[in-house]
Image (cartoon, rainbow, N blue to C red):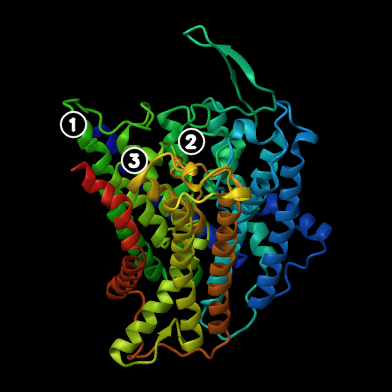
Amino acid sequence: MNTELLGVISIFIVSIVLAIPLGKYIAKVYLGDKTFFDPIFNPIEKFIFKISGINSSEEMNWKQHLKALLSINMLWFFLCFFVLLFQGSLFLNPDNNPNMTPDLAFNTAISFVVNCNLQHYSGESGVSYLSQMFLMFLQFVSAGVGMASAAIIFNAMKERTTEKLGNFYNYFIKSCTRILLPLSVIVATILAFSGTPMDFDSKDSITTLQGDHVDVSRGPAAAFIAIKHLGTNGGGFFGANSAHPLENPTYFTNAVELWSQLIVPFAMIFALGFYLKKKKLSYVIFGVMTIGFLLLVIPTMMSEMNGNPAIEKMGIAQTTGAMEGKEVRFGPAVSGFWSIATTVISTGSVNSMHDSSMPVSGAMELLAMMVNAFYGGCGVGILNFYIFIILAVFISGLMVGRTPEFLGKKIEAREVKIAAFIAILHPLLILSGTALASYFAANDTAMGYWFSGNATGWLNNPGHHGFSEMLYEYTSSAANNGSGFEGLGDNNPFWNITTGIVLLLSRFIPIVGPLAIAGLLANKKYIPESAGTLKTDTSIFGIMVFAVIAIIAALSFFPALALGPLAEYFTLK
């Protein structure tokens, strides 16, 4: 166990240490400063802008940024929907996998466009290599969109008055070419040399030690898995995701994949400090997020390492901890750490089955996505935290009797209303969807077209755990996470369509809100800092932000958690 803990601590510390220089590099990229990649990527970017007819130097206001962002995402959705709907008849399909049904194609296309990668299919049998490659493209561009949105926020937070906030396409292309692509090449190379497939061959037939003949899927997996983590996407090339021995062959690849999903969200926080020349602010933000992360990950790891009390009552020794649903090559400590890292960061990849997690672990995994503000995904983590900063500044201003200000700009009613709406939207989507599904399941409703049979048929577990499965599915969708309590039967019209709607609303409205706030604040008169200015780069303000996050999460989600994983925890005692 001590060795396992040392491995977890090492991965976490290395990720933080490497994130600081990467954050400095990201800030230089967005500022347009000279970097060592310029000779390689300048010609490529100029070519992309030339053939697309885009003037990358043209400044945009926040509304123009949103128009560009939403338009290009709509195009990607329709292209992906078409490919998935007709993949059985298209090329690069050596295993002859069939077309997706319209409802599954709808869900999958939205899921990958919005950086969630909620998968209601198994990669081995559900998609062709062409589909896998298009989904890999979406993993790049969806992460690039989130990072570009963060860059716009960075630009808006500068100390001046303007309505021009850079060029969306410039931020977007640079995020993909100069940040995500080089990192992906490094990680994919490591995975390929560690045993992860990287080919276009059909399934290979092998004979096991027992003498059974098994068909093993292959394909361009290494490249897919690299960007799935670096872009905080999380979609598995194979159905078992990173618990699959070809996606994640060894403890070393497990460490690399964990580092991959941590590095960019960490670096984006430090990039904010370098971009604004306010490193202390980024340290405060990182400190608040890290405290929140540790409060989630420590109980999870302890719960998994201590084992299952129900098995203990049977007199069975659990020297290695709770191993149900976990890979022996990883163990419970790093699996528990991964489960919180992937839910806090919104990656959604798994190296163990969350449905088999101990109740405390399940509660922490849910809470990580419900809060949705500690580290977060590529770029969007900053956007989510920005909302809580606005609310904390407003509340702090009321408490001390001063006009709320953030970085020299007054926070007024319009900005607070937008922030409050975004903060309320997240629990509204999660709890409304869960309430609807629970109502149908509780009444064993005949679902007709929406589900073949009665609603109880989509639950493989009754009682508290069954409720947790439904709660987890909508929480994962609303948090753009993509992981799941896979005991739920979710590949049917009801779950495909309802989670698809949640995915769509929970991705773009929380991007629209922060960009609107940033644009409104950037256009206001800059007020120089004075003795009466509220300091936002202090530990006291950090505590205030943490309190706002904790109160909103507790008030919104504690009743649902009490009905699900917490009630299940007390049944084991």
Find residue 112 and report its horizontal and vertical position in percent.
61, 50
Visible residue check, residue 91: yes
For the residues labelled 2 and 1, the Cα–Cα distance comes to 29 Å
Q: Residues within 10 Å of mark 1 (few under 14, many from 20)?
A: few
- Reading the chain from its start, which is encountered first: label 2 or label 1? 2
**Amino acid at dot 2:** Ser
- Residue contact at pointers 3 and 1, CB within 8 angstroms: no
In the displayed structure, would residue 124 be above or below residue 492?
A: above
Q: How many marks?
A: 3
Residue ID at (48%, 27%): 245
Label 2: which residue?
Answer: 242
**Amino acid at dot 1:** Glu
| Disc nearest the viewer among 2 and 1 | 1
Q: Quadrant of the N terminus?
A: top left
- Reading the chain from its start, which is encountered first: label 3 or label 1? 1
Residue ID at (39%, 83%): 394
Label 1: which residue?
Answer: 312
Who is closer to the viewer here, 382 or 50? Answer: 382
Give the numbered dot on residue 357: 3
Side of 327 relative to 190 (left or right): left
